[in-house]
């Protein structure tokens, strides 16, 4: 019988106040806390002072302590999120916050078709939880010349990406590779991590394409084996690309 994936409530608690409760796979939760903190623009670098994970009978708390300046910014945002795995925008209290501006990424890397195929193949072979359950998403980080250097899995695609970014940190030296479709919040998170290239096996939404274009991200999607579509900033795809 196929193994079933775990799904538990994970509360992200900043300086004693709960900011978000997400349904997630209870693994790599320190990475999840660091990644969520960065991709949501709450804090980065030394502003995240300490983190601990506490198990409870009915869920998990990720307790994070922020520096004073980051705590003040967070209080000013008036956000209270409660997100199921399928929705990365639940609880946002304004259209402006949902469609927030993201920073433009730097020049990043250049990839050819062989690199994209190698990244996809490596990600397929690096998903032990998916192999056991057939019910989770994965996000990987591919660096030319090094291959796939990190992978994280979760029942939620947003969570998998947050976990990856929490593990890797700055993503400008490689490409983020996704098993899921590309919605706008996935592009927003990638931009917050400085990723110049996002590769996905499924299609993007129109808003994801528009956001990637404004942020300077090369968005490669519908990528299967040696075939793919480049939607934005094709200048990073070298001459051997499809």
Image (spheres, grey):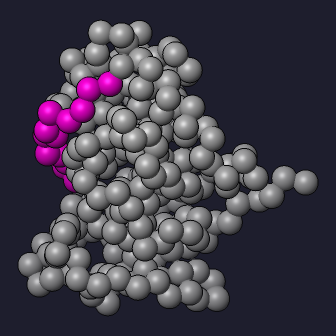
Q: Which residue appears at 24% of the width and 22% of the height? A: 236
Is residue 37 shown above or below 202? below
Question: How far from the left and from the top, in percent, is residue 68?
Answer: 11, 84
User: Left or right of 223: which side holds 77?
Assistant: left
Q: Going by the picture, which residue comes out furthest to the left?
A: 69
Q: Say how many tags the image has.
A: 0
Question: How far from the left and from the top, in percent, is residue 84?
Answer: 52, 59
Q: Which residue appears at 41% of the width and 45% of the height? A: 141
Is residue 63 shown above or below 214? below
Q: Is residue 210 visible?
A: no
Q: Is residue 145 visible?
A: yes
Q: Going by the picture, which residue comes out furthest to the right?
A: 1
Quarter containing the N terminus: bottom right
Q: Which range is magenta?
A: 95-111
Q: Which residue appears at 23% of the width and 44% of the height? A: 172
- Magenta span has 104? yes
Is residue 188 shown above or below 120? below
């Amino acid at each position: 019988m196929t193994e079933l994936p775990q799904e538990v409530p994970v509360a992200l608690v900043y300086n004693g106040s709960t900011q978000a409760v997400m349904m997630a796979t209870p693994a790599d939760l320190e990475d999840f806390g660091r990644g969520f903190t960065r991709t949501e623009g709450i804090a980065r670098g030394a502003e995240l002072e300490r983190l601990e994970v506490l198990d409870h009978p009915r869920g998990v708390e990720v307790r994070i302590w922020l520096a004073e300046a980051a705590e003040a910014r967070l209080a000013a945002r008036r956000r209270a999120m409660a997100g199921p795995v399928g929705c990365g925008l639940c609880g946002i209290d304004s259209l402006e916050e949902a469609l927030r501006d993201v920073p433009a990424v730097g020049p990043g890397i250049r990839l050819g078709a062989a690199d994209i195929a190698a990244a996809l193949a490596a990600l397929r072979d690096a998903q032990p939880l998916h192999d056991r359950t057939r019910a989770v998403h994965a996000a990987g980080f591919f660096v030319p010349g090094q291959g796939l250097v990190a992978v994280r899995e979760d029942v939620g695609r947003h969570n998998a990406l947050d976990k990856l970014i929490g593990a890797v940190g700055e993503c400008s030296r490689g490409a983020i590779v996704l098993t899921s479709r590309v919605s706008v919040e996935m592009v927003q998170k990638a931009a917050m991590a400085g990723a110049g290239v996002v590769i996905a096996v499924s299609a993007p939404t129109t808003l994801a394409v528009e956001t990637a274009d404004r942020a300077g991200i090369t968005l490669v999607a519908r990528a299967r084996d040696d075939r793919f579509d480049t939607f934005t900033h094709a200048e990073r795809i070298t001459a051997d690309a499809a």
